[in-house]
Amino acid sequence: MGALPNVLPGYQQVANAEARQKFEKAWNCKIKDKPGLPMTEMMNSAARGEIKAMYIVGENPILSEPDSTHTRNALQNWISCWWRTSSHRDPPPSLTLSSRPPLTRKRTALSTSTERRVQKVNAAVTPPGDSKPDWQIVSMLANKMGYPFPYQSVREINEEITSLTPIYGGMKIGRLEACYGLQWPCRDVNDAGTPTLHVGKFSCGLGKFFPVEYKAPAETVSAAYPLMLTTGRILEHFHTGSMSRRTKVLNGIEPTGFFDINPEDAAGLGINEGDKLQISSARGEIKAPA
């Protein structure tokens, strides 16, 4: 379902009064008509002391945010609830809630992939210890904080989603049990789903183009920092490595990160393939091979 700050589930705009009223009635609450904050602005707000607490699920902001020092300082101002962030060196005050891994979900879970495919996932192994599925943890927290979450099963949550979110309208659990999954939009129980989202034109119509004036980068190269640095992806590891770094095979292939440098720059600096480098910026430093 995602967590974009400007939309309700299924890309229904927060600014749309009709969409807000529908969810306000279902959730018995008032929804603000202004978007929330994206992650980077959340960290800026937390650093200023404007955000008092944050609930983090499946994310590692110290590693994924562009300025780890700034993020670490921001974390000192609120409670973080995630094992990887809370296990970081000099961690902020934290509470770790034990969520079940995907293959140990009890009975049923629903999962949406990047290709918009919603599938029913069955448990493969016994859940460890007192771990709980994410929906139960969220429900328990909400109840403790005075907002009743009455859900008793994944099926109940599925019923709410299909009733409030048009693009998921036909994705009943019963249908998902009988197929390889359905791809949204799937608007009713007679809809076979949408394998290809954009055919002939974009689903929301033609694109709109607007001219803009050039704005120089906030930071450029300088005598102190003469190279432009950027991050990139590698085949063997996914996002922050919270899953792929646990895999011996992938770690054996690519045990560390590395620097890609233009051969002409490398020759001018006397850098050869495999040399161990320490790269510094105005915000920190890192060591890795070239």
Image: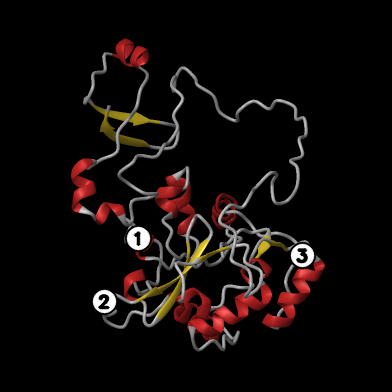
Q: Which residue is mark 3?
A: 33
Tell whether 100 sits left or right of 8.
Answer: left
Residue 148 drawn at (x, y percent): 59, 87
Q: Quadrant of residue 49?
A: bottom right
How is the rendered protein coloured? secondary structure
Residue 138 drawn at (x, y percent): 49, 77
Labels 2 and 1 touching (C-beta < 8 A): no
As helix, strand or loop, the secondary structure at mark 2 comes to: loop
Q: Which residue is mark 1?
A: 84
**Along the viewing direction, whichever of 42 and 179 lies nearer the viewer:** 179
Between the residue at mark 2 and the residue at mark 1, the CA separation in whole angstroms equals 23 Å
Residue 134 drawn at (x, y percent): 44, 75
Labels 1 and 3 touching (C-beta < 8 A): no
**Earlier along the polypeptide chain: callout 2 or callout 3?**
3
Give the amino acid type for the residue marked by disc 1 in the picture: Arg
Residue 125 is marked as: 2
| Badge 2 density bin: few <14, some 14–19, many ≥20, Cα 10 Å | few
Residue 195 is marked as: none
Which residue lies at the image location 43% right of the left edge and 48% below the top edge?
A: 64
Between the residue at mark 1 and the residue at mark 3, the CA separation in whole angstroms equals 33 Å
Which residue lies at the image location 34% right of the left edge and 29% below the top edge?
A: 279
As helix, strand or loop, the secondary structure at mark 3 comes to: loop
**Along the viewing direction, whichever of 280 and 268 lies nearer the viewer:** 268
Q: Is residue 268 depicted above or below 199 in this figure?
A: above
Q: Quadrant of the C terminus?
A: top left
